[in-house]
Amino acid sequence: MFVPKSIVCFREGYTRERLMRDLLAGVVVGIVALPLALAFAIASGVPPERGLYTAVVAGFLISALGGSRVQIGGPTGAFVVIVYGIVAKYGYDGLVVITVMAGIILVILGLARMGALIKFIPYPVITGFTSGIAVIIFSSQLKDFFGLKMGAVPADFLEKWTAYGENIRSISIPTALMALGTLAILVLWPRVSRMVPAPFVAMLVATAVVKIFHLPVDTIGTRFGAVPSSLPAPHWPAVPGRI
């Protein structure tokens, strides 16, 4: 019978030392995961607070019900492409319905012990899939990276690049410089220190620069408004007529 590792740890005895280590790990993971959750939500075509809700609820459930004492749950970049396509076609309610359907399928596969079949998947398939997802995510972020003045980014890969080419002259220099500076911090900061996460440093530096110099760069607040400080009340989604 499966017993969550959190229950096992409490049964074995939860010391003050373990508590302090877990608190430190939680702070580090939160610093990295929460901004990442905002970014993935925006990249997926949904409001940023949806990413926060997902990170908080899913992170808690994974930690409480997972099978490892060192397991970390957080946003997954590979699903950005899939979620963006679903939202573009069926809307947010359609995404919720499809997520529930996927969860039911995963439970069935788990009960059938189909997870063991993953060892037969060729390694080149995994690396090819990961590399392909990285290219697609990269291409989907060029609009915000360069501050292009254009409408919604098309879901299809070739259509994206066609739209970028048509709007290439609308690049925002302050936005592009800020994005390049943030990327440089993410790459170079680990050489300075690995105790403080690079995303945290990049976020603080970029925010301070924009605030001090009053740069004309979009922020979460100017584009999406205030982010809610509490979780919403659960409710059933409106099921689309056709999925």
Image (cartoon, rainbow, N blue to C red):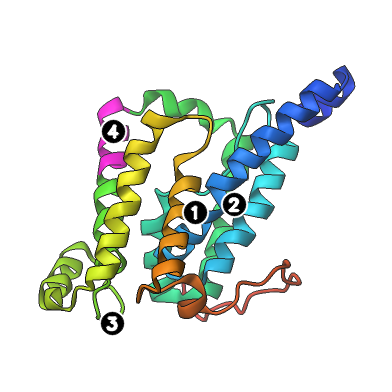
Residue at the disc numbered 2 = 103
Tell me the distance, in whole angstroms, between the alpha carbons under discs 2 and 3.
33 Å
Tell me the distance, in whole angstroms, between the alpha carbons under discs 4 and 2.
25 Å
Q: Nearer the viewer, residue 138 or 195?
A: 195
The answer to which quarter of the image holds residue 232 is: bottom right
Give coordinates of residue 9: x percent, y percent.
Answer: 81, 23
Cβ atoms under marks 3 and 1 closer than 8 Å = no
Residue lying at 30% horizontally and 26% vertically, measured from the top left: 123
Q: Give residue 204's mark.
A: 1
Q: Is residue 9 above or below residue 27?
A: above
Q: Which residues are magenta?
A: 122-131
Cβ atoms under marks 4 and 2 closer than 8 Å = no
Residue at the disc numbered 4 = 127
Q: Earlier in the sequence, mark 2 or mark 3?
A: 2
Residue at the disc numbered 3 = 151
Secondary structure, mark 3, is loop
Q: Amino acid at mark 2?
A: Gly
Q: Badge 1, how many Cα within 10 Å: few under 14, some, many 20+?
A: few
Q: Amino acid at mark 3?
A: Gly
Residue lying at 58% horizontally and 46% vertically, measured from the top left: 31
Q: Is residue 73 within the magenta segment? A: no
Judged by depth in the image, the label closer to the viewer, 2 or 3, is: 3
The overriding secondary structure of the stretch rendered in magenta is: helix
Q: Nearer the viewer, residue 71 or 193?
A: 193
Q: Amino acid at mark 1?
A: Leu
Q: Earlier in the sequence, mark 4 or mark 2?
A: 2
**Left or right: 242 in relation to 106:** left
Secondary structure, mark 2, is helix
Q: Is residue 1 above or below residue 169?
A: above
Task: Residue at the far top: name it.
Answer: 12
Q: Nearer the viewer, residue 145 or 141?
A: 145
